[in-house]
Amino acid sequence: MLAWRRLNTDVFNKGEGNEAGMNRSWLPLKRLQRIAFGLLTLAATNAGAAITSRYNLPPPGSALAQEMYELHDFMLIICGAIFVLVFGVMFYSIWKHRRSKGAVAANWHENTTVEIVWTVIPFIIIILMALPATRTIVAMKDTGNADVTVKATGYQWQWGYDYIRGEGEGIGFLSQLATPRSQIEGDEAKTPNYLSEVTHPLVVPVNQKIRIITTANDVIHSWGVPALGVKQDAIPGFTRDAWFRGDQIGTFYGRCYELCGKDHAFMPIAVQVVSAEDYTKWVASRREAMAALADDPAKAWTQTELVARGEKVYAANCQACHQPTGLGAPPAFPAVAGSKVVANTPELVQILLNGRNAMPSWKGLSDVELGAVATHVKSSFGNKGGIVQPADFRAARK
Ligand code: HEC
Ligand SMILES: [Cu+2]
């Protein structure tokens, strides 16, 4: 009944502190958890621990994730008990009343008592399971009163983050896979966060309610971080939202959970939960960086300016496939050196904006970045030169 009462109290919106949050569990659940934990400790040899951390849910980093973790244990214990009970009775009966002992089957047809019992008991069990689950699901959906709101946009194949409300409002950046190609191809040892590390993590303050609005630019993506208890589809043309409140400082990893499509597995998510002071510092440094980068796309850029900027854009976005030499890795990744597409400005603009086959769309880059990288590839790797203005990209986007 405790669980029932809790349904009516909105403990998730209290705002401050998760210390309280970590303690609010239902009594029977805590006890069951302790039993489960005791069993686990029994089995906790080194190998046991390794297996637990490998197959168990990640350690919760938010009160909501803690709720989910406990719910999972709770359901597992109920299901386990039912399993043992039902199969125990069944195997016992088969063995005890075997024909070789001369057992004669009893006639159970239309035994009202039995039918009532096996309807009522499961019904009670279902209610017991549904009550706490409903409470958590309702809390998951309550995205009101957020301290910071961030829009996460899925692109093929990276995430874009825009801070649209709260401290940090106006900050925006792209977040890409940071694992180098050499690790993927096995030329270099894989680091612990292999395929999870990103160029720019989503930075959020600890103990604050972060609302994530998800949407997508091209295909359906899905934004989620298990340890923070948050996951939401990102659908082109729609917005959905979810929330989390990290209750400890640290970096939490997730990924795009969409399956159909080539590279969803290569657009990981990293959320860095930092202290309030560190968050303020990060916001300030990010603002400075953005001010330095703030460009006027209508300005006529000189070739030298564009090439200098384009080199950086190329290093950050293109050289993983086309190589620092511009020679690519044919046939999978064609060379940009001596490419006919590079020589043909309208085609170059199109391929950069819209992608082609395995070449991703770079719509997520700014017009200035696109103009810069286009001018850079035109003027480097032995190509003949030529300039593509950011304004050309701006015009082509329409
Ligand atoms: C994920 C790998 C990948 C990345 C990153 C990538 N490309 Fe490509 N690119 C390709 C592939 C694959 C093709 C061939 C597409 C096709 O025609 O089927 C291609 C084709 C091209 C072409 C046409 C080459 C030709 O002659 O057919 C140009 C130009 C180009 N890319 C420029 C860029 C630039 C500039 C960037 C960075 C902003 C970039 N690419 C980033 C994979 C990539
Ligand atoms: Cu995706």
Image (cartoon, rainbow, N blue to C red):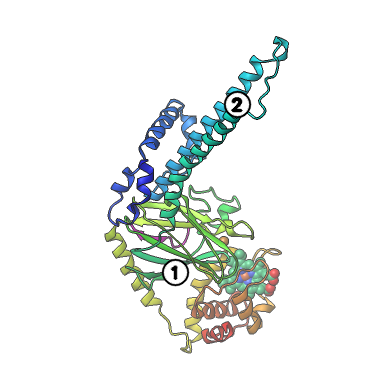
Total residue callouts? 2
Residue at 66% over, 19% down: 94
Q: Is residue 194 left or right of residue 33?
A: right
Viewer-proximal residue among 89 and 337: 89
Q: Is residue 222 above or below residue 365?
A: above
Viewer-proximal residue among 396 and 124: 124
Q: Is residue 200 magenta?
A: yes
Q: Is residue 325 above or below residue 15?
A: below
Q: Residue furthest top?
A: 101
Marks 2/1 in contact by CB < 8 Å: the verdict is no
Ligand 1 placement by image quarter? bottom right
Tell me residue 75's x, y (percent).
49, 39
In which image quadrant can residue 38 be found? top left
Q: Is residue 37 left or right of residue 89?
A: left
Q: Amino acid at mark 1?
A: Phe
Task: Tell me the quarter of the image containing the C terminus.
Answer: bottom right
Q: Which residues are magenta?
A: 197-205
Residue at 66% over, 81% down: 347
Mark 1 CB in 8 Å range of ligand 1?
A: no
Viewer-proximal residue among 363 and 75: 75
Residue at 43% over, 60% down: 201
Q: Amino acid at mark 2?
A: Phe
Q: Is residue 285 above or below residue 32?
A: below
Tell me residue 332's x, y (percent).
69, 63
Disc 1 element: strand
> Mark 1 — residue?
173
